[in-house]
Image (cartoon, rainbow, N blue to C red):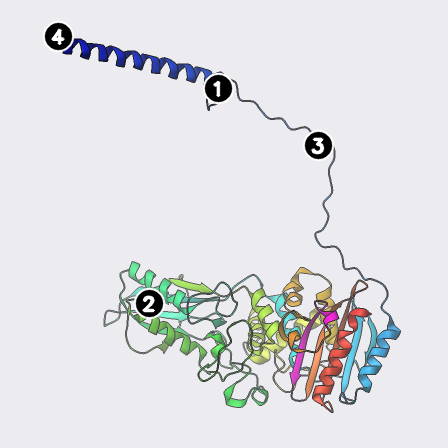
Amino acid sequence: MRARKRMIAQRKRVVAASAVVTLVLGMGYVAADAFDIVPGPLTVEPVRTVEFPQATSVVASKPMVAELNDGPKIDAAKAGSLVDAFAKTKGVGNDYSLVIADAQGNPIVQRNQGTPREPASTMKTMTAFAASNALDMSSTLDTEVYLADGGAEQGDGSVRIVLKGNGDMLLGSGASDASHVNGRAGVTTLVQRTAAALKAKGVTAVSVAYDDSLFGTKRFPDTISSNNGGNDMLYAAPMSSMAIDEARNWSGTTKPSNPDVESAYPTRFADGAARVASEFAKQLGKQGIKVGGSVSQGEAPDSGKPIASVSSAPLSEIMSFMLKNSDNTEAELFGRLTALKTGEENSPEGAATAVRKALDKAGIDTDGIVIADCSGLSSGSKLTVTALMQVQAKYASGDDEYAPAIEGLAVSGLSGTALHRQLPGSADGLIRLKTGTLGDVTSMTGNVSRTKGGVLTFSIIVNKPANMWEAMTAVDTLVGKLPEL
């Protein structure tokens, strides 16, 4: 028993001694750390103030992009020879105009430059010019959901909500797609956000209305149907406050894998906004929100914030989509948005007036031109190659306001409608252009990076060619050689 007590006492003395040793060592390390003998966070040294030497000189900043280099003088004789060869092509005929000019718009060679002719889709460059001047190209077109009547319950206990469009005719039926312009804002995403907002307010039953009042009562230019497949509306949809994929009806037609590349032309629905609302209501029901009755037209509240919304791509990206695909619906949309912004009549005629006024204000020679629509699809429009070329010269000036318009043009060998033309490989990446094609029209306008340095501008319109294929080939041959001037 005594031996056991002696053993316990000895263990206690060992533990106590160990504790003392540990404490001493710990205090020693802390002291060593504080005096920077060993590494650690502690120190007794005062904080040292870092002093930077006074700058001995200042380097002046330079612009990121230098002024446009004119390059060597354009060879007028060589340009004239190219034009002569073009004019002698049998299929071109006599009903043509063209101009080749320097970056400032000073003509080098021109033929019939003052004669107004049907421009086809080169009209879109005029619309892009006007829209770039008038609109905030970084803004978006939002599709919104509002509570009607302050969220008050109706007789059946449901709440009325109103779907309001602000011009996005490139909605997707699914979730919002950040990788594409067409479908950037998705109905499914809008439904999910709406359902979450309603449930947060304790709302489980609704009726759905939609506000399609944005573009008034006249939705189409007067003469567009003759080139639009009549009632099938193959190449343009009537203006609508919102639409899924520009109201295309893909039933029975293979839908392209890339929604941003237009390679098929199905028929279109005339009631784009109503179909968005119906799809919205159908999907909302699957989110646990009871939807009563049928979808109807209505007006969104004049005040208050939406409970949910989705945003389109920025207008600058939509403009690029429009120009590269030669999209008639989006061109008409830009015209209408420009009319609304500048206070013109909310109609196709008001859009045409808004474009014309923007050209006049910028000093573009509009003598003799007629703007029947903003896309060039309608019959009756007339432009001169001089006006088209002067717009290209404005683009080439490098002013920031024109950046979305010039950057949206198709590029030879790389993008858009330029990929469907017979331009030589030597011109790849050097020509930014807009094409135009109708039954009796082939046209092209753009600006060119010259291989010798500098930029030139050009415009060509051929009406009623003797042979359309030969005329288009002649245009491609001429334009494809412009980088060499």
Q: Nearer the viewer, mark 4 or mark 1?
A: 4
Q: Which mark is residue 55?
A: 3
- Span highlighted in magenta in the image: 425-439
| C-alpha gap between disc 4 and disc 1 | 48 Å
Q: Position of residue 443 (x, y in %)?
A: 70, 81
Specify the label residue 38 is tagged with: 1
> Is residue 221 something that shows in the picture?
yes
Secondary structure at badge 2 equals: helix
Residue 140 sits inside the magenta stretch: no
What amino acid type is highlighted by mark number 2?
Answer: Asp
**Magenta-drawn stretch contains 426:** yes
- How far is mark 1 from mark 3, CA to CA? 37 Å
Instruction: Indicate whether 138 appears above or below 75.
Output: above
Between 272 and 254, the one lying in front of the other is 254
The vertical placement of 28 against 230, above or below, is above
Q: Amino acid at mark 1?
A: Val
- Figure quadrant of residue 410: bottom right
| CA–CA distance in space, label 4 to label 2 | 94 Å
> Which residue appears at 49% of the width and 16% of the height?
35
* Residue at the extreme right of the image, as rendered: 77
Q: Is residue 476 left or right of residue 264?
A: right
Q: Disc 4 residue type?
A: Arg
Q: Is residue 186 left or right of residue 7?
A: right
Q: CA distance from mark 1 to mark 2?
A: 73 Å
> Can you say which quadrant of the picture contains the N terminus?
top left
Q: Which mark is residue 3?
A: none
Query: Which tag, 1 or 2, sits closer to the chain's start?
Result: 1
**Could you say whether the residue bearing mark 3 is in a helix, strand or loop?**
loop
Comes first in the chain, label 1 or label 3 = 1
- The quarter of the picture where residue 158 lies is bottom left
Q: Residue at label 2? A: 149
* Numbered label attached to residue 2: 4
